[in-house]
Amino acid sequence: MIATAFFSSTPVPFDIEGHRGCRGLMPENTIPAFLKALDLGVTTLEMDVVISKDRQVVVSHEPYFNAAFSIKPNGTPVDKKEQKDLVLYQMNYADIKQYDTGSNGNPTYPEQQKLKTYKPLLSEVIEQAETYRKAKNLPAFSYNIELKSEPSGYNKSQPEPALFCDLVQEIIAKRLPPERVVIQSFDFAVLKQWKKGVQAGKYPDVRLSALVENLRSPEKNLEELGFKPDIYSPYFKLLSQDKIARLHEKNIRVIPWTVNQQDDMVRLKKWGVDGLITDYPNRAVGL
């Protein structure tokens, strides 16, 4: 179904984004999850990236190995007490790749298929997804890439925004047209840095998305950001019809996360959101 945002004269497809690929069905942020999401018809692959010690852009939600599903190279599960010592920013990618992040499954997502897999590089995800798209003759889809960053982690679990953005833009600029990329972050310093890079002609002019989980109004968050993003992406329970309308008046698209129940999907679409991020893209079919 095509939804038309009232502020645009061109029909824009309702954007179904597979969260971490399709975390509800496959090991999160892995190549099998992204390819499965494409099979389910997502219009955007949503993923997270961190940086390794050797400055590789690694697809991972946490900047460490999550004990809920990670297995060490020797075959023993990562213990919760040690998980935060296994910081990816202090490990070379060759070592990161040896960890299995799929065989244990994830107890929070009982439908998730268990299979041996690993944290891939962003470059590998793009290469595999594009090869798959061509082989299956799929329409062009977008990549929504979240830079996992928080000020307290600068130079500990991730680089500062300038280096982080530099490393990510190098991967994107070589492989994807800007119109197929969204950069999102909860850390507004990252979005400001990207905007600065675009204005300097250094970075690709991709869509920028402000991730939000605080209780401040959209107007307060936009004031803090200091410029108008293309997308406002709040936790879905923070939204109301009125907030969506106010953001649309500013020509900002609204794409909430992480929407997993069909009744919430239907309600939000009725309220006028421009898309949604979900762990279960199969539940969004036919919206």
Image: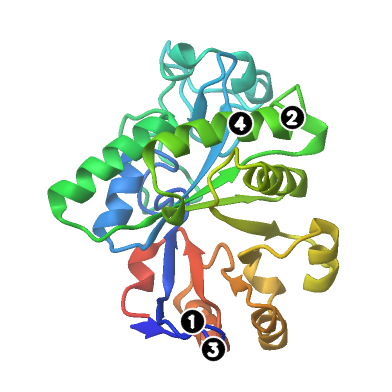
Q: In the drawing, does residue 245 fall left or right of residue 77? A: right
Helix, strand or loop for disc 3 = loop
Q: Disc 3 to disc 2, how far (Cα)?
A: 38 Å
| Residue 56: % across, % down | 51, 22
Task: Residue type at mark 1: give it.
Answer: Asp
Q: Disc 1 to disc 2, how far (Cα)?
A: 40 Å
Q: Which mark is residue 263?
A: 1
The residue that label 4 is drawn on is 166
Q: Earlier in the sequence, mark 4 or mark 1?
A: 4
For discs 1 and 3, the disc positioned in front in the rendered view: 3
Q: Is residue 175 above or below residue 54?
A: below
| Residue 195: % across, % down | 68, 49
Q: How is the image coloured?
A: rainbow
Residue closer to the observer: 95 or 158:
158
Q: Label 1: how many residues lie within 10 Å, few (<14), some (14-19) or many (20+)? A: few
Q: Earlier in the sequence, mark 1 or mark 2?
A: 2
Task: Residue type at mark 3: give it.
Answer: Phe
The answer to whether mark 3 and mark 4 are in CB contact below 8 A is no
- Rendered-image quadrant of the C terminus: bottom left
Q: Earlier in the sequence, mark 4 or mark 2?
A: 2
Q: Which mark is residue 62?
A: none
State the residue at coordinates (77%, 28%).
Answer: 154
Helix, strand or loop for disc 1 = helix
Q: Is residue 113 visible?
A: no
| Residue 96: % across, % down | 48, 18
The residue that label 3 is drawn on is 6
Q: Is residue 287 visible?
A: yes
Q: In the drawing, does residue 238 fall left or right of residue 151? A: left
Q: Disc 4 to disc 1, how far (Cα)?
A: 40 Å
Q: Disc 1 to disc 3, how far (Cα)?
A: 24 Å
Residue closer to the observer: 64 or 114:
64
Q: Label 3: how many residues lie within 10 Å, few (<14), some (14-19) or many (20+)? A: few
